[in-house]
Structures are given as C-alpha cells and as structure tokens.
Image: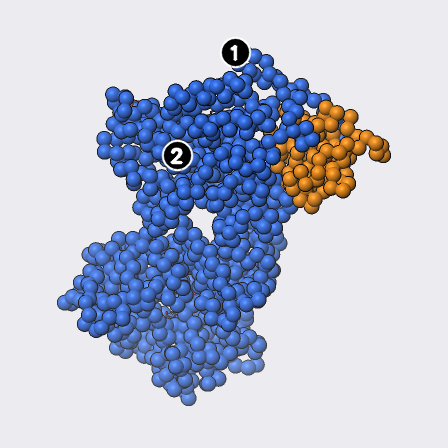
Chain colours: A orange, B blue
Amino acid sequence: MDVARATALCAVADIPLEGGVAALVDGVAIAVFRTHDGSVHAIGNVDPFSGASVLSRGIVGTRGDAPVVSSPMYKQAFDLRTGACLDDASVSVPSYDVSVVDGVVLVRGVR
Amino acid sequence: MTKRQRIVVVGHGMVGHRFAQAAVERGLTETHDIVVFGEEPRAAYDRVGLTSWFGHPDGAEALSLLPGGVYDDPRVRLVLDSVVTEIDRAARTVTVVSPPSAGSRDGRQGALLDQRGEPGAVTVHDYDVLVLATGAAPFVPPVEGRGKDGCFVYRTIEDLEAIKAASEAATSGVVIGGGLLGLEAANALVQLGLDTHVVEMAPRLMPVQLDDVAGVTLVRHVEKLGVQVHTGVLTEEIEGDRSVTGLRVRQAGTEEGARTEVVEAQVVVFSAGIRPRDALARECDLETAPRGGVLVDEQCRTADPHVFAIGECAAPGGTMYGLVAPGYAMAEVVVDALLDGPGTFTGADMSTKLKLLGVDVASFGDAFATTEGALELTYADAVSGVYKKLVVSEDGRRLLGGILVGDASAYGILRPMVSSGLALPDNPEQLILPAGSGVRLGMPDEAQVCSCNDVTKADILHAVAEQGCEGVADVKQCTRAGTTCGSCVPTVKNLVEEHFASVGRVVDKGLCEHFRLTRQELFDVVAVHGYRRFDDIVEAHGTGRGCDVCKPAIASILASQTSTHILEPATAGLQDTNDKYLANIQRNGTYSVVPRIPGGEITPEKLIVIGEVARDYGLYTKITGGQRIDLFGARMEQLPAIWKRLVDAGFESGHAYGKSLRTVKSCVGSTWCRFGVQDSVGLAIALELRYRGLRSPHKLKGGVSGCARECAEARGKDFGVIATEKGWNLYVGGNGGATPAHARLLAGDLDTQTLVSYLDRFLMYYVRTADRLQRTSTWIEQLEGGLERVREVVVDDSLGLGAELEAEMARHVGGYADEWAATLADPAKLERFVSFVNAPDTPDPTIAFTTERDQIQPIAPALIPVGAPS
Ligand code: SRM
Ligand SMILES: Cc1cc2nc3c(=O)[nH]c(=O)nc-3n(C[C@H](O)[C@H](O)[C@H](O)COP(=O)(O)OP(=O)(O)OC[C@H]3O[C@@H](n4cnc5c(N)ncnc54)[C@H](O)[C@@H]3O)c2cc1C
Ligand code: SF4
Ligand code: FES
C-alpha cells in the first residue's frame, strides 16, 4: 500500500456517530461515515442518480447486515463498505480505503 | 355378556348435551343406554349466545345445539318438557313429571320463583348412573315489588320472548346488576329500543372481573352506546301498582331512608348473579357446598358412587363455575370415569372474554394482582377507549393475569401464557401495546387456543396445513374451535393468517425491515416508555440500525412528544434530508429558504428585507402557492448567514422542510372585502402562529376564508375555516396534491374559542393516531367510523379526552421556539453547515448556475459516469 499518498481528513470525532461528512481530496468530493459500531467508511460523495454532491448528508443505517447510507435526493441505499447501490445492481459509487490512526481519519487511493 | 347399563341425565342444557355427545363419540353408548330429561320445551341451545336470539328471524333454531331434537345414536333418548322431581337413591330411581305445568314453562315465573308446577303425567325411571346437569337459576334479590308484572330474568329463550313482548309497550328499562350478564341484558334492552339503565351496587361495572380504571373505561364505552350507568347504587323498591313503573334507588353508603331517586322503567331485568340448581340433590341428602352447588370430587362424583353432577349445578371441590368451558370439561371427565379412564377435573380458569355491546372485555388469571410481589404493567389509550393491564410475577418472568377493555385481541395468547406458565418475552409490554402483536410473539404449539373446546395451536395448524382447511370457517368445523363462546375466533383467524403468510400470502404492516410496528404503535411505545433516544427504541423494539423510513418517523414522534430542537445530538442523525439542514434540498444539492409569512400578510419593510437578502446572496425568488416567498439556490454553508439576516429582521422558520404545519392561507376578509363577514386574515395568522412547528405524520395546511365565496380555498386544506354570519364553519380532511380531497364539515357556527379548542383536539388526535405520511383525508377515511368518529371525539368529547388533547396542544404552543433562531444561537448546531470537513469554506465545485429571465437557474451537474467500486 502506498502510505505516502494517505491524506489526513479530519479527527474521527468530527464525524457524527451514524452520520457523515464531506471532504475534498484533490478536487474529488468524498463522503466519510462513522457507523454505530464506530467503524469509518469512505465512498464517493456524488449521488449518481441526481449528479449532486450530497451522499454525506444521507441517513446512515443498515439494510440486512450491510451498513448503508440512503441518498438524500431519491433515497437509494449504498453499501458503505463497497459503494454498491443496493437498489440498482448496475450502479455503484467509488469506495475508498480509510483508516484511523491516533484519532485521525486517513484516506488512500483517491484518483 | 354384561347387562347394558342405564344412565339418566337430568337437564338438557349446554353441559347435559355435551355429556351425551361425548358419550356417543367416545363409545360409551356401546355399553350404556342414555335417557336425558329436559325441563325446557326445546333441546339444548347455545345459552352463551342467547342475546343473538334478538334480531334473528329464527333465533331459537339458530341457537339450537341439536336441531331436530334427536340424537343420531338411538341409544341416546331425549325427553323434553319433563321435570325430574325426585331422586330415590336407595331404589336408584327418578320421578319425572311431564308435561310440567304452564308455570314452569313460563320462563319468567319459573325462573323467578324456581318453582315447579302441579303434577302432570308422573313416571318413574331406573338408573345405574345418574348425572345431574340442572344448571343454575338467576338470583333475584329480595327487593320489594319483585313479583310485579314487568320483572324478568335473563336465562332462557322464554325469558327473552317475555322481555320482547313487554318491551313493545315500554319506553324504558332497567337492569339490576352491572356484571357480565347484566351488561348483556342491557344490550338486549337497547336493541329493543328502550331507554336503558343499569344499576350496580358496586362502585364500578363488572366488579368481579375489572379494576377501577377498567371499569371506568367500560362505562365510557357503554354510555356511548346509550346505556345510562348508575354505580354505587342500591335498589330500594320496585314501584308500580301491578305493573312496574320505576325503580327507587339510593346511593350506597347512605342511611336507609336517605334521599332516593326514581329511575323510570316499565321493564326490569334482574341480573344479580346465579345460584346452582341443587335442590334435587339436597332433597335426597347429597351434600352441597356452602355457597351452593352439588359437592363432587375430581371425577365429579358425589358421595354416592352412582350419582355425578356436572356444569353449573356442580361444585367440584366446593367451587361452582358459572362458565360453560369448565362444565364441558366436567362432562368429559364423567364420560371418561365411566370408561374407567383417569380424567379428573381439578379446577378451571375463570377467565372471561366477551364482546359487550360491541366492546371487547377480558379478564383472566390473577387480574387483581393479589399474588405477593406481583407487578402491574398498564397501557391506557383514552382516545380509543382501550385499557390493558398485565399482572406479572415479581421476577418479571411469568404472566399471572390481566384485564383488557376495548381491545382484547391479545387475549388468545395471554390466557394460555397464564395457564401454561410459559416464560414471558423480554418486552412484555409488547403484549399489550396496540395491534395484534400477539400473533408475532409466537405461541407454543401446545398452547390452548380454544378453551371451550380444548383446541391447541397445533390442532389448528394441523387443520390448515394437513387437513386442507382454507379458512376460519373450515377450521371451526374441523376442530370445533370457536364454536362455543366464539372468543377465540380472532386468535384462530390470526393463526390461520399467520400460516398463510408463512407460505407467502399476506402483507406486513410494519414500518420497515427494522420495525414490525406501525407508526401509531411506535407512537404509543415511545409514550408508554418515555423514550428520548433512537438507540433505546431500536434496541428494545427493533432490529439493525434503522433507515431513511424509520429514523425520520421516530424523529417526528419524538418531536411531537417533546418540543425539543430537532437538531439536538440525540435526534439530529435521524432527520430527513430537509429537516437535517432546516431547508429544502434542490436538484443540484443547494437549498431553498422559506421564511414564515403568517396568513400571507407582510409589511413592506419585510418584503424589502427579503428582496435585499435574495439580491445579496444571488437567490432565485418566487411567490409560492402557499402565499409566501421562496428563495432558491443557497449553498448549505450559506444558510446560517442568510437566516441570520432574516431572523434579525423578525422572520422565523417557515417549516417548508418539515412534516409539520406549512401555511394557513387566507383571503383578505371583512377588513377590506365588501362581502367578508369575519376577519379571515386575523384568524389565519392566529392559527398559523398557534400550530407552527407542530411535527405531524404528514404536512399540515390550513385555510381561512372570509365568506362562502371561499377565495382562500380553505376546503382544499387539512383544516379549513369559512366565516358565517354567526361565526365559523370548520372543515377537515382536505388537500390538493396527488389525490385531491375536499374538506368536510366537522362543526358549524362556532365562536373563535370553540373553534380553536376543536382544532387543537382534531390536530392532536391526528398526530397521535395517523400512519406515517398519511394526510388527514386518508387518515379520516381509514379511521373506523370515519368523520363521524372524529366528530364524536372532537366535538361530542365522547371519550372525555378533549381536555387532554387540548393540554397537549397547549404544551406544544408553550414549548414552541423558532428552530432557526435556536440554531444560530448554538455553535454546536452550526458545525454541520460546512461544505467540506477539511475545507469548510470551499464551495461545492459541482454547483453552477446560468441566468434565465434575470434570475439564476441551476445547471444540471454533469452526471458523473458510474464506476465500479475501487
Ligand atoms: C414551493 C412550492 C411550489 C411553488 O413554487 O408554489 C412547493 C414546492 C414543493 N412541494 Fe408542494 N409546494 C408548494 C405548494 C404546494 C401546494 C399548494 C398549496 O399549499 O396551497 C400543494 C397542494 C396542496 C396540498 O398540499 O394539499 C402542494 C403539494 C405538494 C405535495 C403533494 C401532497 C399530497 O398530499 O399529495 C408534495 C409531496 C409531499 O409533500 O409528499 C409537495 C412537496 C413539495 C416539495 C417540498 C418537494 C420536495 O421535497 O422538495 C417542494 C419543495 C419546496 C421548496 O424547495 O421550497 N407539495 N404543494 C409551494 C410552497 C408552498 C409554501 O409556501 O410552503
Ligand atoms: C345470557 C347469558 C350469557 C352467557 N355468556 C357466557 C359466556 O360468554 N361464557 C361462558 O362461559 N358462559 C356464559 N354463560 C353461562 C353458560 O350459559 C352456562 O355456564 C352454561 O349454560 C351452563 O350449562 P349447564 O348445562 O350447566 O346449565 P344450563 O345450560 O342452564 O342447562 C341446565 C338445563 O337443565 C334444566 N333443568 C334444571 N332442572 C331440571 C330438572 N329438575 N329436570 C329437568 N331439567 C332440568 C334446565 O331447564 C336447563 O335447560 C352465559 C349465560 C347466559 C344466560
Ligand atoms: S372569500 Fe369572500 S371575503 Fe374572502 S376575498 Fe373572497 S369574496 Fe372576499
Ligand atoms: S374459547 Fe370459547 S369457543 Fe373457543
């Protein structure tokens, strides 16, 4: 893994529990979420159905066992672990590798 | 070969008939001949269902348990119209008089005086086995005047015939006794068109089965049906010369001769309890229990091994049981004993469930929590007149008993839990919260569903799964479940439906995959437990971590119940898209800003402020369909600054984003309009300010027109007010939108104060009971009783709830605070209004505008190509 390209985004505490924030990395908007169990996930922020950069503002919850965010625009659910849209198998958003080091959220592999 | 034995049964009532039936079914007639003597002129009939005789063209036939009056098995002979007058135990004979005198066939007299007539044809019959099944007779307290014409009891078809005949010339009737049977008799008098009263000595109805709250809840229901209830009242005398004219009563606890009151009535029905008919046994020196009933052992045998007693005339172990199920069990036990079986009767569950005047009432097990350490869990919904109480063991593991009024659907699962001692589920309150949750809490296969006929869940499932039963009717036929008192039919229905659901045939009414409850059920769960956090609710009542359906629904429920700011940490994450940023999201991810303009009235200064703000932030401006101004195209991070300008100028949130009150539209009204008869603008403003911020199942809109020309389109709103010469007409349940509906008149010519109190009640009733995303029109439509029901609750205050609903609204009005002002004052709430967590002031690069007709318009963001997950 290319450690050098890890980007520090924010403190993990900046992300509301079961909520998300948007971050800008090299001009790309990514949505970073913290689920109820404390794990952190990152996917693209742009909602592919409307084109608006809004996924970080969706409601975080679960569908079956999958942690999901539902788009605030038209409510499709996206798997936070993979970016796959669970309401339309042909659609997905990018998913990014995130880790938390000393309370700081690091993301890798954006663009 | 042994000689055939001869069984004589005295009494062909429900239990005597069951005995004969069981004897045939179980082969007892292979070795025994049976003769049954019945005093009544007809074969056994369903006494439990006696009341249905009224209003049924062939009432007697419909009730008969043995239509035709002859058993298929020739070894069972039924002799009707015949009274057993004497038992000679030494000779093992009975003396029978038939036909009896007219006196005993006259149900009223015969039962009232418990006397037999003069002898007719007298015959003597041998027996090897004698089974007493003589039932019980109504108890008539020694009240002065009780023999007058117009006094009745309520036990046989003849009693009903007599009551019916007497009612034709009567205008009012009174039932003495407010127990189970008394209320049933009252029901009959109502059906006969009489002005009906019930007088009960105890301070509440059904004192044996119900506690005070349950009794009060029941009184409300019963009074709503037109029965006047007098509790805590003693009957002094029945007035009238030969025929009854009224009942003189006095308050219990007052001195004899204290002030009395007369309840006018031409028909009096005694329903003050029953007494076992044990005279025959006493006369032949068989022991009776201190409180009546032939004393028998666990095999229902008297001290004389040749004589048994079953049903209401018997007292196994000294207790008599005034219900049919224990009687049936006794009949089976005696058949078993005669076949040398091991069956015993060791007591019965005195649980009762019935529908009284259409009201479900059930009481079972230790209903009064007399067990040491017993705890009570209660649920009361005065809106719908439901009261439920569970009595639970000290360790919370076992159900000991309970009371259900208004909704007894859970009875089917609760009663078996008491008798089988099954462990309670972890959330026992689910058992009493609304809507057939009983079914979902899987009952064990061995649970007895029908107590009258001892049918278990397994029997029922077997009938549907293996025996091809297609519905409840088939199952009844196949298993006998539900064929006696009928109280188990809903449970049978649930089981059948559950089975079909399991093979893919039914719709789930639950909110979403995380909650099997409906919104109304969740509303109640939150109210009962006082929950304030989603986590507590989902942990106790749901699964997973929620979704965009249940989270906003719970956020709305919490907001309706608490008036706390929707962006408090506990609820911020639950809010729907628009609520989350206190603004409506637009197609490009920007937001609109809608300040409240109550009633559409606005000063020039305020108009100018809106214009300046729109100009300074470059927002698109439009007059909305709701008589206010919408500013579009604000970036999320701009919202606080825009709102600061507006709040400083005296504006507040217009809640265009919330499922809450939007606008109260008004016409210009009597101040300017030459036709106006009232100040519609003034009222619209007052109403909008009163109900602003009220979180509700769907959005709410109102309208006020100054006269019948209706320029405010008030009847297209959830609540519409139209001025009249005398005041206001109030309409409810209108909307535009996808399925337009016209509001309908709820009440007319109201003064402003009454109007407001009705509206308070109406809106709170809606908030409490409607489903998620149900506008008022569909809510009213789906409410049992529809608009009429709403009128009863809101206008007639039939449930006595008005004050409570108004108090809830007063709490809302008092707790209101402008959401935007509060947000601006709280740095923690403002933290979320940043574009990017690592670049808070960088505008979202995907947002761009062009210009059209001198204002901005969003450019559709280039749809980003959809990529595979990286
Ligand atoms: C702005 C406005 C249109 C306009 O330019 O005039 C409007 C705009 C929206 N309407 Fe509306 N409605 C507007 C008046 C109406 C009216 C007319 C009225 O109120 O007199 C109706 C029909 C009357 C009614 O509601 O009974 C109306 C029926 C709807 C419906 C359908 C409701 C229904 O019961 O079928 C929706 C969808 C919903 O609420 O689920 C809706 C939903 C919406 C939403 C909130 C959709 C959304 O979630 O983004 C729109 C965004 C508003 C925004 O961004 O500010 N809007 N909408 C009007 C704002 C009124 C206001 O000042 O608050
Ligand atoms: C209006 C009403 C509603 C009820 N609702 C319910 C309910 O919801 N649930 C419930 O469990 N129970 C209910 N009951 C009670 C139930 O009807 C009785 O428990 C049941 O009928 C008892 O059966 P039994 O055979 O012991 O007595 P009965 O059905 O009274 O039968 C006894 C029969 O014996 C006859 N008889 C008496 N003496 C002689 C004699 N010497 N010679 C010949 N014949 C004689 C009588 O005339 C009568 O026909 C209700 C009763 C009434 C009146
Ligand atoms: S509804 Fe009547 S009072 Fe109001 S503006 Fe129209 S005509 Fe005038
Ligand atoms: S419980 Fe009475 S018929 Fe089933």
At horizontal 32% and vertical 30% (from top left) the residue drawn is B682
Locate residue B376, reporting x and y percent. 49, 63
Indicate which quadrant contains ligand 3: top left
The x and y percentages for residue A55 are 65, 31
* Type of amino acid under label 1: Asp
Q: Residues within 10 Å of mark 1 (few under 14, many from 20)?
A: few
Side of B283 where B392 appears, left or right: right
**Which residue lies at the image location 46% right of the left edge and 82% below the top edge?**
B302
Q: Eyeballing the image, is B315 above or below B194?
A: below
Residue under mark 1: which chain is it in? Answer: B
The amino acid marked with disc number 2 is: Leu
Instruction: Say which residue label 2 marks.
Output: B689
Query: What residue is rendered at 61% in x and 45% in y?
Result: B514
Question: Quadrant location of residue B91?
Answer: bottom left
Specify which label sits upstream in the sequence, 1 or 2: 2
In the image, B521 versus B819, the foreground residue is B819
Judged from this view, the residue extending furthest toward the left is B241
Residue holding disc 1: B854
Residue B114 or B744: which is nearer the viewer? B744
Q: Nearer the viewer, residue B92 or B757?
A: B757
Q: Residue at x 65, y 29 (%)?
A: B840
- Callout 1: helix, strand or loop? loop
Cα–Cα span, label 1 and label 2: 34 Å
Chain letter of the residue carrying label 2: B
Q: Is residue B774 in view?
A: no
Q: Residues within 10 Å of mark 2 (few under 14, many from 20)?
A: some
Q: Secondary structure at mark 2?
A: helix
Q: Position of residue A20 (x, y in %)?
A: 66, 36
- The numbered mark at residue B480 is none
Give the quadrant of the N terminus of chain B: bottom right
Quadrant of the image occupied by residue B387: bottom left
